[in-house]
Image (cartoon, helix red, strand yellow):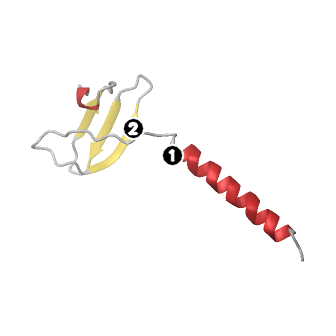
């Protein structure tokens, strides 16, 4: 019996498990509240070097926000 394919499969499985664990811990998903008169149709997100968040909306609006530890504390 050739054990090489089994060894390759085991190594690949370990790499996938490790990669999945690292990815799950690399980011945090938070919900942000939009103004009531503005539909949350996001076209793009970007952060400036100073930490300012820019949100481009589908209808042409651009929102800016300075993130804080509290997701409801955007200003």
Q: Quadrant of the N terminus?
A: bottom right
Tell me whether circle 1 and circle 2 mark residues in contact (CB < 8 Å): no
Q: Secondary structure at mark 2?
A: strand
The mark found on residue 44 in the picture is: none
Furthest-front residue in this view: 1
Q: Give the mark nearer the N terminus: 1 vs 2.
A: 1
Q: Is residue 2 above or below residue 34?
A: below
Along the line of sight, the residue nearer the viewer: 13 or 29? 13
Give percent across and percent down for residue 49: 45, 25
Provide the residue designation for mark 2: 46
The mark found on residue 24 in the picture is: 1
20 on left or right of 74: right
Give percent across and percent down for residue 4: 86, 68
Along the line of sight, the residue nearer the viewer: 61 or 33? 33
User: Residue at point 68% right, 60% down?
Assistant: 13
User: Residue at point 62% right, 50% down?
Assistant: 19
Q: Secondary structure at mark 1?
A: helix
């Amino acid at each position: 019996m050739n054990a090489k394919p089994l060894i390759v499969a085991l190594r690949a499985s370990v790499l996938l498990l490790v990669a999945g664990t690292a990815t799950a811990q690399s980011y945090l998903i938070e919900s942000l509240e939009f103004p009531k008169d503005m539909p949350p149709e996001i076209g793009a997100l970007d952060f400036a070097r100073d930490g300012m968040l820019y949100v481009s909306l589908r209808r042409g609006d651009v929102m800016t926000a300075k993130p804080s530890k509290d997701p409801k504390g955007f200003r």
